[in-house]
Amino acid sequence: MKQGKAIGQWLGLLMLLGAVASSAAWAQATKIEFWMPGQEPTIRSTMEGVIKKYEAQHPNVRINYTQVPWEEWFTKLTAAIAGNLTPDISGLGYGQFGMLVGKDLFAEIPLEAADRQDIEAWALNAGSYRGKLYAFLLPETRPFAYRKDFFVEAGLDPNKPPKNWDELREYALKLVKRRGGKVIRAGVDIPYLGWVEQVYLTFYAAKKENANLWEEGGKPAFFDQEGIDTLQYLVDLRLKHDVVLPSDQQSIMGTAFESGAAAMGFPKSQGLPMLLASRPGQIGFALPPKETYSKTLTLGTFLAVYKNAKNKKEALEFQRFINSKEAMWEIYKGILFLPTRKSLQERFITDQDYNRILAECLKNSVSYAVNPRFGEARKTINDELGEAFYGRKSPKDALKAAYDKLLELSQR
Amino acid sequence: MPTGMARRERAQGVLFYVFMGILALVMLFPLLIMVTTSLKSEAEVYMQEAFTIFPQTWRFSNFIETMRVAAWGRYFLNSVFVTSASVVGSLFLNALAGYCFAVLRFPFRNALFLLLLVGIMVPYQALIIPQYLILKSVPLFGGNDLFGRGGTGWLDTFWALIIPQLSGSFGIFLCRQYFLGIPRELFEAARIDGAGPFRVFVHVYLPLGKPVLASLAILKSVAVWNDFFYPLIMTSSDSMRTVQLGLQAYRSYALFRWDLMMAACILVSLPLIIAFFVFQRNFMETAVASGIKG
Amino acid sequence: MRSDRIAYLFILPNYAIYLAFIFAPALAVVYLGFTDYSFVAAPRLIGLQNYFRLAADRIFIRAVVNTILYWIITVGVSMAIGLALAVLLNKPRRGVAFFRGTFYLPNVLSLVAVALMWLWIYDPARGVLTTLCFALGLPASDWLFDPRLALYLVMVPGVWTMLGFNMVIYLAGLQTISPDYYEVAKIEGASAVEQFRWITLPLLRPITFFIFVMSSIRSFQVFDQIYIMTRGGPLNTTTTIAFEIYQNGFQYYKMGYASSMSVVLLLIVGALTLVNFAYGREGSEGV
């Protein structure tokens, strides 16, 4: 019995402490939970700078910042959603946004007219669903890049990148290096394992206007003659001309071009400074080789506020701040997400010599449409495209199989 | 001894060492690669046309540089704390439980033991979400009310990383097997002398159980130290990360720093390697003696 | 025999934690296997639909096949090599402790580190294997990017880390076999091979079953290597049940479906464990 009394006393004390603590919290500042994916230390330092500025302007708000490496990001966020422990505001993967926006997870953004004028339409479209805006896009794009030193080695003019698909193939044939019958340096980097639908989309969009893998909602839209021809061209680069290396877009080791094992490729814009620093003067940039059009894959990270956020109003305010001119410029300088405001374009283009090309790429970009089953859909396409790249299916059969599966998926 | 036999024995001896030596080299070759890669400069690892074994310049500074990439000091502290607490706690609890199942008699003993076997068989990826939800709902912790609602419970705290580790079906199983092999007369004698069950445990079985405890300690240390997936889900702050999570920090936009990554892998494995060499004799001579007794 | 009910108190901490953090989640998973839970809304019961879908899911079937292949080969090879090494190193020669330590060392490394190491070795353009092939004039493969080879290549790190552990346990077992048996056999004129077959192997039986069960459970849960080295590719040739559980749960948000996969895995492992306990009881004190 004595024990029972002691326990009762402890419980009482705990409850008292709990009451005191929560009332103390009442008087404290509003707390906002902010999560960002990625592991670069520059993300943290840049965001913390932005946060500091915001907190200075809003003294009764405290922002708790957490950064999660991409490897863990999806698991982490899924667990948070399951446990109803989502942050107030967070970054989101490109496809991830598409999967979650349809589940009514995000708060609609009250966009002012001035912002609507200033922010590029394609950026606003990317973050919209059924006509409403739910997230701001922090874009990264993938221009065409090539190794000038390898060009010179192969007898090509380092200032004349390939202009179309035929030239791309011809150059690749000249630039490839083999040993023992095996390609050890690819002519052009076509990552055909892992996320091959990204490469496919880039080239497909060069053949067809407004190309996309699927419509908003997931209905597949790639099974046509242009799609088949695109896949045939890409598959030939591997099977017929043998100018590519096994390369995985999301490999932990980076793509072949980034690691110096390919002469031409499509590196991510965020990695360019590091790439250039490691090979000064050797990298050239251009718009992707044109077939009918010249399109660049533009993805990036979305920024959204959660609908059930504890402090939604303050979170939306913070989101607006991140998207403001000053913060957007800081984020560009620190993390290399490209600015989407028209008013920043001049400053952007003069900031780095290759930014002119990046700006052009952004204007002609292609990306994923919103798909509530993004994860499964893209894996399905990826698998079927892979079958074509390994010569197990003809491009037409592969695309047909992918189309059928995606159609069924979108209707479930 | 006839010289023929002596010579043959010596030849066998040489053959043995040569054979074992080659085998050991093959076995350790990947480790060798890891070490030499960690000592290479970035340019060598990365931009080479082909692979070379030895570094041109021996960059021991890589080890220091790798520590700067993330808050390694903190990660190491976390891992050490979580691992030691888990090992000490689980060792005691498992030995005690194993003793109960092996020696003491009580109703439903066998059924209760069999139920524990489920714990050995289940895949951890499957359990992770329910575990996450349960850890989130621990009452009165992390801002939760009496019913475990409203806050984050044990998530992102050391409780989440340690408490679930304390119950090990495998550890209980091993201890039980081992204690079954200890003659029951010892138990009887001690009881007749008037000792309670707990005292018998502490004074008779624990001392005799040193071999199995040593083995368990090593197995548990390795398991907890190397656990990656579980801390991944249960922690979010940087200050709670363990050493395995730290290894994730090396992936970058453009360049993957193999040299720093390998250096980090070595540093992360080092404590266990050292512990292993220190406790080696203990572990290997008497390892899992309980397993033998079947 | 008075019953020591205080034992309940002793096992309480263990049991409480076990029930809360292992058993209850396991039950939750079984339940979720009958639902369409996808994290955002509450789970909705859909009966056996998930299981029907599993039966027709080609990728899952592939994963099951891969997992079984992985299990048979890694456990078989690592046990065989482990036993062989244990027999060889059972002599009191000088330096034996060094060799034992060497072979056991890989078991102590983190799987993340091991997977990365082997990923580097397998790099198709510049890795160790490719370079070796060039040096020897052999045709180099794409290694992990070759759908025919990938699964077997992924097994190598698994065997590499497991065989030292098996060797150590076998060593302990060998040391309990009384040398008298061998003396008698030698006098009777039995060869080394015959001694091995008729004395060593049978007496090691309980250990063999123990190692077999533990290794099997571990190999059925293989995940880390796949996650880091191949992500299930190329063309789903290296996906395993555990990896599909992760993919479906955390990438596709199909937690109900992933849970049904977990139940399948649980049933397979459970069946294996039960069979082994029944079989391995010979020569051991009953459970």
Image (cartoon, rainbow, N blue to C red):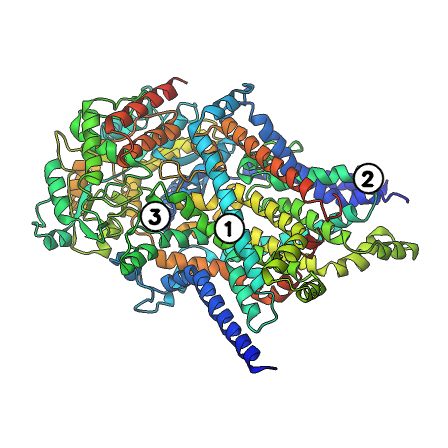
Distance from disc 2 to disc 3, alpha carbons, whole Å, reads 66 Å
Please give the chain letter of the residue carrying mark 1.
Answer: C
Q: Secondary structure at mark 3?
A: helix
The answer to which of B157 and A98 lies nearer the viewer is A98
Q: Position of residue A158 (x, y in %)?
A: 10, 50
Q: Does residue C222 appear in this view?
A: no
In the image: residue A335, left or right of residue A183: right
Q: Position of residue A15 (x, y in %)?
A: 69, 37
- The amino acid on which the numbered mark 3 sits, given as a three-letter code, is Trp
Q: Nearer the viewer, mark 2 or mark 3?
A: 3
Distance from disc 2 to disc 1, alpha carbons, whole Å, reads 58 Å
Q: Which residue position holds label 1?
A: C77
Q: Quadrant of residue C57?
A: top left
C170 over A340 or under it: above or below: below
Distance from disc 3 to disc 1, alpha carbons, whole Å, reads 20 Å
The answer to which of C168 and B41 lies nearer the viewer is C168
Q: Which residue position holds label 2?
A: A4
C259 over C100 or under it: above or below: above
Q: Are marks 2 and 1 on the same chain?
A: no
Outermost front residue:
C189
Q: Secondary structure at mark 1?
A: helix
Q: Are marks 3 and 1 on the same chain?
A: yes
